[in-house]
Image (spheres, coloured by chain):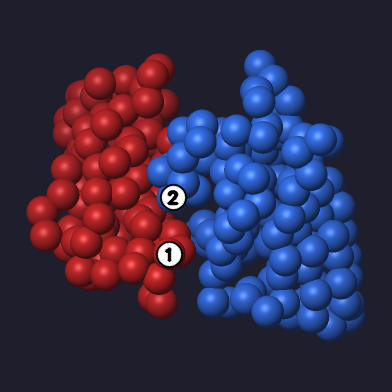
Chain colours: A red, B blue
Amino acid sequence: QSALTQPASVSGSPGQSITISCTGTSSDVGGYNYVFWYQQHPGKAPELMIYDVKNRPSGVSNRFSGSKSGNTASLTISGLQAEDEADYFCSSYTVSNTVIFGGGTKLTVL
Amino acid sequence: EVQLVESGGGLVQPGGPLRLSCVGSGFTFSSYAMNWVRQAPGKGLEWVAAISSLSDGTYYAGSVKGRFTISRDNSKSTLYLQTNSLRDEDTAKYYCVIARVPGGYFYYGMAVWGQGTTVTVAS
């Protein structure tokens, strides 16, 4: 099964908003609300930022929000801050009873 | 504090075996499904395998099915990944990850990640 499709990179200035897309199929993103977003800073382990499409774990800033339409999920970060610069990965449960990740998006804060 | 400490990584020849371990602390290990996720150097994340809290269900990515075996010993709060018939493309950092919900399925999200152990397959 191919990885979910994410843009390789996005960028934005401090204070702006950016959106990262994650496109799958009806067998994964489109078929389930088990869509997640992870943030990974260089040399660090990933951190869960969004679960079940749109929910934030305790401690995650409300500047992070998630949504889904059809086979595409999205992560929006508002009020960009320098500390948001990182790699972001989406993931989804699949019809094959497995988990699949996106290829990752490098966010640059200009 | 919840902690996961992986070990067992190293340099192994193609075709060889390696057993990874992950010791959990600071939480009720036996209540959570667990996952292994890997990341090749400079690449993205790849889910490898998962196991239910009581070992009654195991799940594998197609790329490792038949070669890797996930298991756990709840009495030792330890998760294992037995890797066999290793290939160059198995070279990666392997993370041990706790599922998000106690008593829930492995696919409910990955809440806490270890720091990883590195496996290098090369002759």
Callout 1 touching callout 2 (CB < 8 Å):
yes
Image quadrant in which you'd find residue A59? top left
Where A55 falls versus B33 (above or below)? above
Residue B15 horizontal side relative to residue A97, left or right: right
Query: Which residue reaches farthest left?
Result: A69
Find residue B118 and report its horizontal and vertical position in percent. Answer: 76, 55
Q: Write the residue at 57% across / 67% down.
A: B60
User: Amino acid under label 2?
Assistant: Tyr
Q: Is residue B104 above or below residue B25?
A: below
Residue ID for mark 1: A97
Q: Is residue B24 above or below residue B89?
A: above
A87 vs B74, left or right, is left
Along the viewing direction, whichever of A106 and B30 lies nearer the viewer: B30
Q: Quadrant of the N terminus of chain A?
A: bottom left
Where on the picture, by quarter, is residue B43?
bottom right
Q: Is residue A39 left or right of residue A54?
A: right
| Residue at image location 79% in from the left, 44% down from the top | B73
Q: CA distance from mark 1 to mark 2?
A: 8 Å
Label 1 chain ID: A
Q: Is residue A17 visible?
A: yes
SS for dot 1? loop
For label 2, the residue is B107
Give the class, few, some or many, for how many residues have Cα within 10 Å of label 1's Cα (few <14, many ≥20): few
* Dot 1 amino acid type: Asn
Circle 2: element type = loop
Residue occupying image coordinates x 58% and y 37%: B32
Subunit of label 2: B
* Residues indicated by labels 1 and 2 sit on the same polypeptide chain: no
